[in-house]
Amino acid sequence: MKKLTWLHDLQNFAGVLIGLIMISIGSVIFLNAGAKLYIFGFASSSYFSPEHRCENNFYEPSPFVVPETIQAKTKAQKTPEEIAKCIEKEIIKERKRYTRDKQEDIISGIILIIIGFPLWFFHRQRKEKDVKLEKIS
């Protein structure tokens, strides 16, 4: 008779549970990112506003900008043509950023599924094998 059989059962239970959790989370991440990017064709976050980024009072913070330079930038007014070009650049930049983020999410989901499935499968097999051995004994 085995000593500490509960520890062996706990190991199987934890392996199955962790595997299922990883598969579940990976599937949700994968499906969410894939649907947003390839099915619905989203090109940006719902919070993205190129108009706001291109207003005359907006500037990109930089660690190398001196406060006087910031004030000089905010005083300069942009023409409508400059604002239109800025909006176009921001849309392109956001599309690239959003696509990259969603592709990374898809990869993360796939990795969770790839790691979680064998973990779940082999611990489930071990549990079934233990149950069969108990029936024989």
Image (spheres, rainbow, N blue to C red):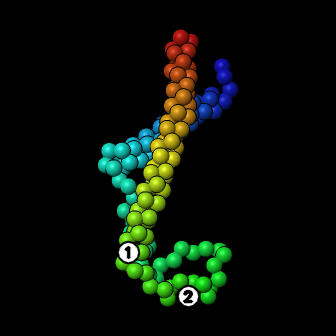
Q: Which of 13 and 79 is in front in this view?
A: 79
Q: In this view, does 134 lie to the left or right of 86?
A: right
Of label 2 and label 1, which has the lower sequence position?
Answer: 2
Residue 45 versus residue 49 in the image, above or below: above
Position above or below: 119 against 95: above
Q: Which amino acid type is marked by label 2?
A: Gln
- Residue 98, horizontal then vertical, whole percent: 45, 55
Left or right: 47, with 103 as reference point: left
Q: Position of residue 85 (x, y in %)?
A: 41, 69
Measuring from the top left, give residue 4's x and y in whole percent. 66, 30
| Camera-side residue of 111 and 134 | 111
Left or right: residue 97 compared with residue 41: right
**In terms of depth relative to the viewer, which is nearer, 129 or 101?**
101
**Residue type at mark 1?**
Glu
Q: In the current view of this chain or complex, which residue is farthest to the top?
A: 136
Direction left: furthest residue:
40
> To which residue does mark 2 refer?
71
Q: Badge 1, how many Cα within 10 Å: few under 14, some, many 20+?
A: few
Which residue is painted at 49% across and 38% down in the image? 110
Residue, disc 1: 81
Residue found at the far right of this picture = 3
Residue at image position (53%, 33%) is 114
Element assignment for label 1 = helix
Residue plotted at (46% across, 82% down)? 57
